[in-house]
Every structure is written in C-alpha cells, then in structure tokens.
Amino acid sequence: MTTSTVPSLRQDAQVIGLVGIAHGISHFFHLILAPLFPWLKTAFSLSYAELGLLMTVFFIVSAIGQALAGFVVDRIGAHRVLFSGIGLLGVSALVLSQAQNYPMLLAGSMLAGLGNSVFHPADYTLLNKRVSTARLGHAFSMHGITGNLGWAAAPVFLTSIAGLANWRVALFSASFVAFAVLLLMFFYRDVLRTDESRPTTKHAEAVGGHALDFMRLPAVWMCFAFFFITAMALGGIQSFSSPSLRALYGMSLASATAGYTAYMLASAAGMVWGGFLASKTTRHERTIAFAFTAAGLFALVVAAGVVPPMMAVALMGAIGFGGGIAGPSRDLLIRAAAPKNATGRVYGVVYSGLDIGLSMAPLLFGTLMDAAHPAWVFIGIGIFQCMAIVTAVGVGANTARNAKAAAAA
C-alpha cells in the first residue's frame, strides 16, 4: 500500500482474510495438546500436573517471545515474522508427533509457544498498516472471530483423528494444516508486504528517541494490565466453567459443555456487533465498560446459583456476548495508545499479558475447585471482568488527554 492511495475493498478483504486465517491457526495450536491429554496420559504415564505443565510452558514461552517479537516485527517486517511463526507451529507438531518421552513433549510445547508468540504483533501491525481506517473495526472483529474458530476446530480435528488412528497421526496431520496455511500466505505474500525499513534517525524520533522509550508510557502498561486481567477471566472460563456448572447446578457433562459452547458462539456474535460499534466511536473505553459490566454481572448471577440450569447455560452465552462486543474496541483502544511506528512493539508487550494471564488462571481457578468452591470460579470471573473496566477507562482517558494536548500544541 502506498501513502498516496486508499486501500480498495478487495485489498482490505484479502488482508483481513489472510490475517484471520493465520490467527485461526494460532488459536488452533493453543489447543494442540489439551484435547489429546487422555491419550498422552496413558502413553507416557503422566500425572495431571505434568500434563498441565505442558500448557504452562507453552504460554510462558509465548509470553516472553511475544514481547520480543514486536521489536523484530518493527525491524524486518510483519509478514516475514508471521511466516516464521506459522512454520514453527508446523515443526512443533512434527516434533510432538514423534515424541518418545516427556522431555520431547516439553520441547515440542516450547516450540509451539515460540511459534505462537509472533501472531499478535505481526497480525495487528499488518491490519493497522494494510487495512483502511474505516474498516479497522470490522478487521479486528473478524480477527477475533477466526481465533474463536481455531479454538473450536482443534478439539474436533485432533480427537477425531486420534480416535480413528492414534494421537501421533493426529499431531502429524496438524503439522500439514500449519504448512498448508504457510503455503497460502507465501502465495499471497505481496498482499501482506508492509515495506518496513530499518530504523532511521527520523524513525527513532517518531517513537521517542529510543526503541524502548514506548515502555515509559503509562497507557502501555495499563493495556498490559487490561490483557492480563481479562485473560485471567478467560482462562477461568476455558478451564473450569464446565466443572463449576456441574457442581453448582448438578448438570450433566453434556449440558455443562453446552454452556461453554454457548459462550464461544455468543462471543463470536458479539465480535461482529462490536465491530460495528467500534467503527462508530472513538471513545472505545465506554463500549468496553458497558460490555464488561454486563458480562461481570451475569457471571455473578451464575455464581449465585439462583437460576434454573438452562438459564445458567443462556447466561454463559450472555457472558460471551459481552466479552465479544468488547474485543474490537479493545484492539482500537490499544492502537490509539501506541506511538507512531512502534505498533509491533506495543502489541507484543501488551499481548504478552494475555499469555501470562492464561498461564496463571488454571492454577488459581483449579485451586478454588480443589477447595470445593465452584461458585468462586464465576465470582472470580466477574471480579476480573469488572477490574478490566478500570484499566480500559484509564487507557482511554490517558489517550484523550494526550490527543487534546497534541491538538493544543
């Protein structure tokens, strides 16, 4: 895209579609191991703690790598970094499919985490630089939806193949999914070029004189806190909403699973609506505050155990819908807070909070379940969602002050 032309609808759609597919494969690999735990537990005689450590290692490596990947994105270009991440995911699945012992599983999980680390800084840099501003809200909406689709596809794909053949074939097949996506991205590589150049003096001035100066901005760390807090809520829902529903309402496993399915589907629907809302306002923190207030209150109602079981399933959908609405506004809020030409670095650091939260949430909510406090799973989810409002409002207020000061200057 040149500075003299406005992206066409066709180009915007191509970029949004390609980045969405890449994001979907990233989320697919979030669950590359969890659906196969029953097979891995038997094959390697592992404890649940050892299985959980595989996921913790994935997200810790991803969190560290994500903060660093943003710098690489800003230096050599988002599309190159994105291609390397997809390739690493494919290699990680190959390594996992050939694992002969637990250390090899850990190594494969670390490789997958390293591959996953590049997606948010690369994806959001591509969307911000290659998609017209008027369509960014819809772009971020589609980005979130494809991530949810990746989460939904992984368990079905992996368990189906493992049931028909074995877990090694399932992982080997997953590697082909990653390499097929990589081939598609390479074929359309010109659509994803952002023409970055190496940092110059002018570039350095644009981001504050030094590559790390953006880290002095309060808004960056408020965004980091926002992602950490929301990830804690998301991690609680992903890990323990189903067993908590069963304990609170005496539901069958099928009904409790339906609650989580309702959450995921409603979240995707909320992202669609959230894309339209985000495109019509610049005060994105207000949309986030409204959505998370509603979602947090619904979570507390579920925790109280005062509604019929089927209503609890419906409320799970309402919680997901609120979180989905907030998604596009969240991404535009970060975009507004990011210094010029530091997009990759900001998204890398900020989104590392997501991985850290996802790595810690299962430990916290698992402890609550072990202590026979299933209601506190949803209480915790509601509290974290309400806490996220404070950080979002802080980011929005800070950005508005800076914009007003710049206009006055």
Image: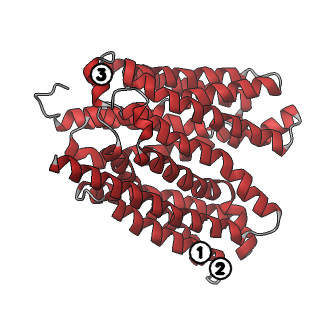
Is residue 339 rendered to the left or right of residue 108? left
Q: Distance between the residues labelled 2 and 1?
A: 6 Å
Is residue 149 rendered to the left or right of residue 238? left
Q: Which residue is drawn at 43% across and 39% down?
A: 216
The residue that mark 2 highlights is 304
Q: SS at mark 2?
A: helix
Residue type pointed to by label 2: Ala
Viewer-closest of 77 and 243 = 77
The residue that mark 1 highlights is 300
Q: Distance between the residues labelled 1 and 3?
A: 46 Å
Whole-percent x and y of residue 286? 34, 64
The residue that mark 3 highlights is 193
Whole-percent x and y of residue 377? 68, 65
Residue 148's place in the image compared with 186, above or below, is below
Question: Callout 3: 10 Å neighbours few (<14), some, many (20+)?
Answer: some
Whole-percent x and y of residue 58? 65, 34
Q: Distance between the residues labelled 2 and 3?
A: 51 Å
Q: SS at mark 3?
A: loop
Identify the colour scheme used.
secondary structure
Mark sitting earlier along the chain (2/3): 3
Residue type pointed to by label 1: Leu
Q: SS at mark 1?
A: helix
